[in-house]
Image (cartoon, rainbow, N blue to C red):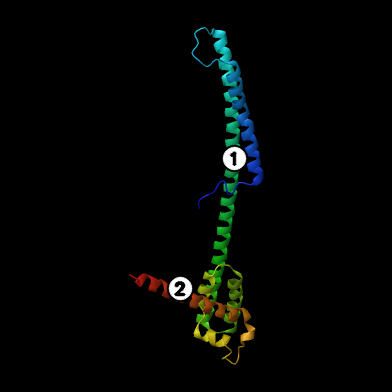
Amino acid sequence: MEYKYFNKTPLWMIVLVSTVGVFALIPIANLLIVGYNNLTLGVQTGLSLSELGQMGDFFGGHTSAFSGALSLIVVLFFTFHQAKQQREFFLAQKAEAAQNSDRQFFLDGINLVTQWEMKSSGADQCMRLLDYYSRLALESADRELLLILNTVITAQIRKNLEGKNGSFRATNYPYACEAVEKIRTLREADSRAHKAKRKENLRP
């Protein structure tokens, strides 16, 4: 992702750099004014070595002050943004690691639900696990978790959630029921998007 320096520069940094920039221009302005008033810039043949040395010191002193101030601006600006980029990078890495850890935990839970479902389809323990991981999927911002959850919801589980099995009631597993409805909505939206994409691709 492209890092936009000026968009991410705070107001205090802009004021600081601008202030240093103004002070950096003072030596150059002074050089021009004093040079214009006191130096003859034309070709001269009568300047002594001492006068030439004084002229060199005059120009060198002012230009070095400007160069120093300009270097300070560059160091301040890029040091600040380098630290900011590093902080954003580490925060992004931390968030990605946390997301991967949460997803792995969720996948392990889905695997456990699958094992119980294979052992005893629609058993109470399986339903309780499904309800728990449904809650995690609903609370997560990752929509893929709900679609992954859908892969373990068998016909028997759906019957239990719909209350068609006398030993189960839908109210016992509220998160699983909500997840099923949410999954239905996501799949319908994906289906519409897929049809629209196919229709767009078929256009000449």
Q: CA distance from mark 2 to mark 1?
A: 45 Å
- Residue 174: x and y, percent? 63, 81
Binning the other alpha carbons within 10 Å of mark 2 as few (below 14), some (14 to 19) or many (20 upward) gives: few
Q: Residue furthest right?
A: 12
Q: Residue furthest left?
A: 204
The local secondary structure at tag 2 comes to helix
Residue at coordinates 61% horizontally, 20% vertically from top-left? 34
Residue at coordinates 59% horizontally, 73% vertically from top-left? 138
- Residue 75: x and y, percent? 59, 36
The picture quadrant where one finds residue 50 is top right
Left or right of 138 on screen, residue 203: left
Binning the other alpha carbons within 10 Å of mark 1 as few (below 14), some (14 to 19) or many (20 upward) gives: some
Residue at coordinates 47% horizontally, 74% vertically from top-left? 190
The residue wearing badge 1 is 77
The local secondary structure at tag 1 comes to helix
Which residue type does callout 1 highlight?
A: Phe
Q: Nearer the viewer, residue 137 or 122?
A: 137
- Residue 21: x and y, percent? 61, 34
- Is residue 7 positioned above or below 95 on the image? above
Residue at coordinates 58% horizontally, 32% vertically from top-left? 70
Q: Nearer the viewer, residue 198 or 140?
A: 198
**Can you see residue 81?**
yes
**Can you see residue 151?**
no
Placement of the C terminus among the 4 image quadrants: bottom left
Q: Nearer the viewer, residue 3 or 105?
A: 3
Reading the chain from its start, which is encountered first: label 2 or label 1?
A: 1
The residue wearing badge 2 is 193
- Residue 180: x and y, percent? 55, 80
Residue 19 disc label: none
Which residue type does callout 2 highlight?
A: Ala
